[in-house]
Amino acid sequence: MSTNEPVWAVAGERTVTCGHCGQGWFWSRNIVLSSGTATLFGVDAFSPEATVLSCTSCGKIELFDPGALRLSSATA
């Protein structure tokens, strides 16, 4: 889920909060975790993905397995 609005997340049945400032709203996007070798040989499509949560308050970034998160927006 990549949105233009903040989301809150649940991972492992616990609400995710920022490890730095403690608040719970994040910007979310998915990224590909490719290596230089994968890019060189054009096999980035087979690289694993991660969901990036970036704290809306302080900007701290955390990575999660996309299948391990449930994301909800304020409008959901």
Image (cartoon, rainbow, N blue to C red):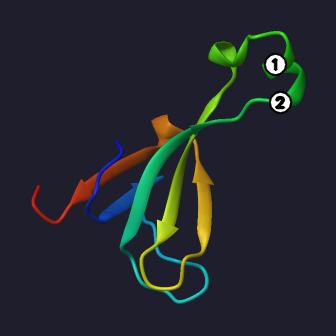
Q: Which residue in the protein does label 2 denote?
A: 35
Q: Residue at x 44, y 84 (%)?
A: 57
Residue 13 visible in this rendered orientation of the protein = no
Task: Estimate the x, y position of residue 15 in percent, counting from the top left.
Answer: 40, 67
Where's residue 25, x and y in %? 36, 73
Q: Residue at x 11, y 55 (%)?
A: 76
Which element type, helix, strand or loop, lies under badge 2? Answer: loop
SS category of the residue bearing label 1: helix
> How many numbered marks does the figure carry?
2
Q: Position of residue 64 (x, y in %)?
A: 57, 49
Amino acid carrying label 2: it is Ser
**Residue at 39% over, 57% down:** 10
Q: Residue at x 39, y 76 (%)?
A: 24
Q: In which image quadrant can residue 47 be found?
A: top right
The circle on residue 75 is: none
Rendered position, 68 above or below 36 = below
Q: Along the horizontal axis of the image, is 12 left or right of 8? A: right
Residue lying farthest to the left in this orientation = 75
Residue flagged by tag 1: what amino acid is it? Ala
Q: Which residue is mark 1?
A: 38
Q: Is residue 17 visible?
A: yes
Q: Is residue 56 above or below residue 76?
A: below
Instruction: Specify few, some or many for label 1: CA neighbours under 10 Å numbering under 14, 14-19, or 20 or more.
Output: some
